[in-house]
Image (cartoon, rainbow, N blue to C red):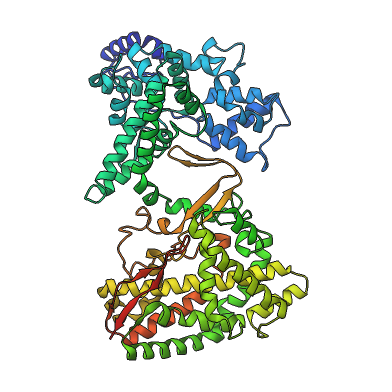
Amino acid sequence: MLDNCEHLVDACAELTQALLSGARELRVLATSRRTLGIAGEHVFTVPPLSVPDEAVELLRDRAAAIRPEFGITDANRATVTRLCARLDGLPLAMELAASRLRTLTVEQLADRLEDRFALLTGGSRTARPRQRTLRALIDWSYELCGPAERLLWNRLSVFAGGFDLDAAEGVCAGNGVPGHEILDVLDRLVSQSVVLTAEHEGLPRYRMLETIRQYGRQRLSESGEERRLLRRHRDFFLGLAQDVAAAWYGPGQEEGLARLRAEHGNLRMALEYEGASGTYREEAEAAEEQAGDEDAQASHALVAALRHHWCADGSRYEQVRTALGDWETFSSAQGIGLNHGFNEAWSSALIHMDPPAQTEQRKLFTERLSPRALRPVAENIDRRAQRLADALLERGSFDAVADLAQDLPVHVIMDLIGWPQEGRDELLDMAAGWFDSAGPDVPRTAAAVPKVQALMAYLAEVVAKENLVPGGFGWTLLEAHKRGEIPVEGAIGLLAGYVVAAFDTTISALSSGVWLFARHPEQWEALRSEPALVPSALNEIVRVESPIQVFSRVTTREVDLGEGVLIPAGARVLHSYGSANRDERHFPDPDRFDIRRNPVDHLGFGFGNHGCAGQGLARLEAHAVLKALAERVQHIDLDGTPVRALNNITRGFSTLPVRMS
């Protein structure tokens, strides 16, 4: 066994070759930061400690040896895991971090990692000098590199979340490392474990552990090359983004989007080059005015070139589903809207709550909307759907929004609430305004505020006058308020949630279904020939044309999404249901409408504790309508130009002229 061969790699290689040549059955185990590069060599990579298991265990054991009372608890587990992840699971880093827990808390230690090389010192006095501090360990590896290798190490530190060979050649070549030598020098850094190989969506990539990258970044700053390399980095990814944007409407779209996804961390970093604050801005202010203007123009061009990237890559299915299921990390308690006014006005609404308060009030919904509770109204819904289908087929041409999709929600849902007959039609417009008012601070949002104010006033008046039919859901809320279980604001908020969600989302799903079947007659024929596909068809409709496109939540802790994306605590995060439901990683060929797909795990009705409480009723209505139409209608055709209902949050139609026969 030969240990630590990296500083004598040539001699160790010659010795090993000689020994193997003279003894055929001999096996040599060599440990080294560099490969020996001889015939018959098999390389086994020794990875860092796994996070959280191995790294957390080592940190706990070493810290307990210094502070016997130290332990991993529910209160510090997340911080300990984050600390280990940021230290890349490096054993020496864990050892040195544990020694700092003699005087610092885990939280203080994690907060000070920005300068990890000054922080992680004080190793064992009996250890070799290079193993007493984190910097000394990396210094040792750095000194073993040749001049070109050190130069490339420094320059590669400008990449965030990894890079590919094209990027390395485009950004790092020149002044000591010619472009044609980048591959060879990079290969030597890989053989020395300074650079690691990886793969993203089938694309070969390289990356550096964060500790190695930060060391290189400090060296780059000391060299005086940092600003020049950062500008080259920005310019390279500006060119990439512009190339993808130029070829967006063509056969290269999928490949281009995959490239942008892989470079997400680098794109964010390139945008920050001329950010509103931080080191880059301070440097820019000190630069020449002309260069500053050019940098600003390049930054604006990058933002414009990435317009497709942000829309097409807004959210991944697994990310959205995980976030929706983790209310403790992604909280609704500060509101789900994108402006403060909306979140403040509707703070008592169920959708703006977290457990346990949300769990208790949600029971008022679930008890009245459970399958058992809805069973008595199912026959009425079927009968009304059948009469509606007969009437519309007799008419032939009609508006699928006003004449078809709105019928059951306006009548059935209002009857279940116990709503008075007067005012039902006005509620439709008010409900659409509610969703619009949840958008960002833009003119469309402001224009919706009067509608929402009218809705709030109307609901408050109904509650105050108890103008609801006894026995309905609304009456249940009034009784809960009278018993002191919910405040009057809570009763109004729950009533609004029922009305708004039941109206707009159900209407959008029904009208979108008609539109999809008009565009895909083969799918309508499949449904007519096999009515048992109705539930599957509705799932596919909601997946393809998600009625709710986005909501937001606020993070309670730092969240690492991977690919160089770190969301800080207290950030408002957009959850894109529509994007998640068209994620090709989860739904193959996601833009294809196929009623046999049966995507039961779609996110169109939400997920987790805020999953749509009224989806059982929505399914009853939609199933009844689709079944009634399938039994009677042979053909669905567009009879004019559909008009989208523009809204900050929802997706649907304002008018949808169709002809049925």
Residue 632 occupies quadrant: bottom left
Residue 573, position as x, y percentages in the image: 52, 49
Report the front residue among 40 and 26. 40
In the rendered image, is residue 263 in sight?
Answer: no
Left or right: residue 79 compared with residue 238: right
Report the front residue among 461 and 194. 461
Left or right: residue 131 compared with residue 43: right
Residue 208, position as x, y percentages in the image: 41, 28
Residue 631 lies, with reference to residue 510, above or below; the image says below
Residue 203 lies, with reference to residue 224, above or below; the image says below
- Residue at 69% from the left image edge and 26% from the top image edge: 104
Residue 140 lies, with reference to residue 656, above or below; the image says above
In the displayed orientation, state which residue is furthest to the right: 483
Residue 15, position as x, y percentages in the image: 32, 9
Q: Quadrant of the C terminus?
A: bottom left
Left or right: residue 88 compared with residue 235: right
Q: In which quarter of the image is the N terminus?
A: top left
Report the front residue among 658 and 457. 457
Residue 239, position as x, y percentages in the image: 29, 35
Residue 17 occupies quadrant: top left
